[in-house]
Amino acid sequence: MSSSGTRRRAASVPNSDTDDREPEVGLKKEIGLLSACGIIVGNIIGSGIFVSPKGVLENSSSVGVALIVWTLSGVITAISALCYAELGVTIPKSGGDYSYVKDIFGGLAGFLRLWIAVLVIYPTNQAVIALTFANYALQPLFPSCFPPERALGLLAAVCLLLLTWINCYSVRWATRVQDVFTTGKLFALFLIIIMGIVQICKGHFYWLEPEHAFHPFQPYNMGRIALAFLQGSFAYAGWNFLNYVTEELIDPYRNLPRAIFISIPLVTFIYVFVNIAYVTAMSPQELIASNAVAVTFGEKLLGVMSWIMPISVALSTFGGVNGSLFTSSRLFFAGAREGHLPHLLAMVHMNRCTPIPALLFTCISTLLMLCTSDIYTLINYSGFLNYLFYGVTVAGQIVLRIRKPHIHQPIKVSLAWPVIFLIFWAFLLIFSLYSEPMVCGIGLGIMLSGVPVYLFGVYWENKPKPFNSFVAKLTRLGQKLFLVVYPAEGSEDGNEDKEESE
């Protein structure tokens, strides 16, 4: 099914509620360079660097190797982001890797990427981040015990509902929230780094001296080191989220690569130096034993001000939920626009120009995920599937070069970069299949369950008239309920011209 045909059909659906303003309705280009950096940094830095950097250290077997893993994981992330920057300006569509995979490998491959995102990846990730926010926000009220599960679930739900409302109300408000909370988490992390520098100046750098840094506290094992790289790579997850909102970027041909070039080195610097700071106050054994490393670090060095750390984690995760809602709704919006999800999800509010149906769909699916007890098991499956499609997308960059050698590419990176990434990707993927065959097998099964859904919902075009009529009535009802219409064709270009003229 061609995307152009899908979009023509979507644009031609009758709507009695539209008026002369309809041609002006569409996603607005309101994301500048600062907000673009906030989206990348805010989505990468969630709770992980505050809570559980111990996974990388435990599997690296020494402080020195752990720091190397954090650095190399950042380098590999930068290489993959370069590849995505080329794809993002060559195929300037919102939807990120879904749009690239669909355009390069066809509708089925793109749908499977979208299917796992809808079914597993975003609902589970957002639910876990919201629960982490609730846990750390409530910690000062329950200093000697864990907060009640109902309280955690309720506060997580309130967080999701509030941020969904903000995103529905205004793109500008959503990006401002992202900017503010990204600034807050960076302040907390730089506070940790500064305290680490003070510790070093006081002579507390025992675990940074080469003879101690590379002294293993358990025997080195290549399998464990590979697992450390896998966990380090997952810690950088979110680096590709800006590609999901390409159509809302002001001057994407310049700001997309600029935001990537600024954000990825900044995050790598922070990750490496925060881990250095941690080992100036804690031994590797203390760090591995801690369930919340930043909190333990704060208790050791901040004294009565140690409450700053749990509050910082809460603020960090609150911004992480906002960034994930913002970007995932654009993925679902892009999928609906191509005919891979219900057409209602491809509509935007007539006045606010926000994709309200897609945002509500994202929020509801996440709220449902809060009700399941298997959420952390699903996270394991989603991590493998996410990484699988990173490699498929970067491989698509090479395929696109071969198929369309003369296509206009405002950015063109050396083919050495995608090759280096794919070698590293294949190494980690093979190791994952070897070490956790059950998790990978179930993950692949979840992905392949989308094939019959694709055949019924997308490939089968001549559905019975009663079915089409029922879907059309539901769509019309949704339009009236949410005051949404299909974006006008070419509205994105119009917005861009408007921004450039200003």
Image (cartoon, rainbow, N blue to C red):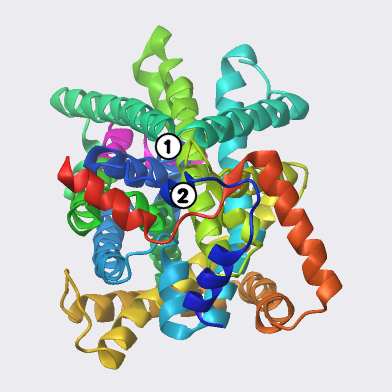
State the predominant SS element of the stretch in magenta.
Answer: helix
Choose between 190 and 292: the one closer to the eye.
190
Q: Residue at x 43, y 34 (%)?
A: 174
Q: Is residue 276 magenta?
A: yes
**Distance between the Cα atoms at labels 1 and 2?**
11 Å
In the rendered image, the quadrant that contains the C terminus is top left
Circle 1 is placed at which residue position?
A: 171
- Callout 2 secondary element: helix
Tell me residue 277's x, y (percent).
27, 34
Tell me residue 82's x, y (percent).
23, 65
Circle 2 is placed at which residue position?
A: 327
Residue 26 seen anywhere in this rendered image of the structure: yes
Residue segment shown in magenta: 273-289
Vertically, is 118 above or below 185? below
Q: Disc 1 or disc 2, which is closer to the eye?
A: 1
Q: Is residue 348 left or right of residue 187?
A: right
